[in-house]
Amino acid sequence: MQTPLLDDLDRLILAELQRDARQTNRALAETAGVAPSTMLARVRRLEEAGVIRGYHAVVDHRAVGRTVRAVVSVRLQPKSREVVAAFLDAVWQLDETVGVSLTTGTYDVLVHLSAKDVTSLGERVLHDIASFDNVVAEHTALVLEQREKSAITAL
């Protein structure tokens, strides 16, 4: 996919939608100083180009009973496309998985988990991740504090 060229209006739209994706098209147009029809066309273009991939609610894990966060580092063998793809697909399907990263270095995959407690986390790691056929090493680190940016500020 070719990176679309973003002008100042596109950057303003992205900044505003990251600040508040629930604002109306009319409010967004007013902030940008353009007609609502122009704003609608620009937002649609950004969506169609894949710059805006969706809109979602940010949920507090603790508020929904997910009090334990962890990152599971996994080494796979062999590192064939098929093995990696199968592992990524399998862990992505787990209810506790909130993110998966394919990496370089000592470990091949980082699985980000959010669980209700240490017992359920342990069950998930032992029975569904570490026991996967091609996992040759696994290291689980509990997350003590997590900060995430949901917005890209320097566009």
Image (cartoon, rainbow, N blue to C red):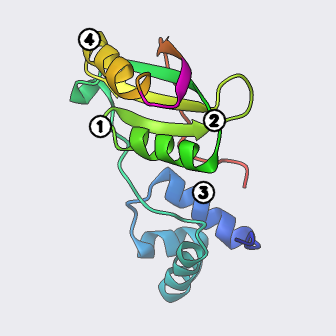
What residue would you read off at disc 2?
78
Residue 155 horizontal/vertical position (percent)? 72, 55
Mark 2 or 4: in front is 2
Evaluate if marks 4 and 1 touch, with contact meaning CB atoms under 8 Å apart: no
In the image, what residue occupies the spot 43% across and 59% down? 21
Whichever of labels 2 and 4 marks the residue nearer the N terminus, that label is: 2
Question: Residue 104, position in %: x, y?
Answer: 73, 33
Q: Tell me: 124 left or right of 134.
A: left
- In whole angstroms, how far apart are the C-alphas of marks 2 and 4? 30 Å
Q: Judge depth for marks 2 and 3 and give the one in front.
A: 2
| Nearest to the observer: residue 14 or residue 66 | 66
Residue 15: numbered disc: 3
Task: Please report whichever mark, 3 or 1, sits nearer to the chain's N-terminal start.
Answer: 3
Q: Is residue 93 left or right of residue 19?
A: left
The numbered mark at residue 95 is: 1
The mark closer to the camera, 3 or 1, is 1
Tell me which label, 2 or 3, sits earlier in the chain: 3
Magenta segment: 132-137
Query: What amino acid type is highlighted by mark number 3?
Result: Ala
- Disc 4 + disc 3, Cβ < 8 Å: no
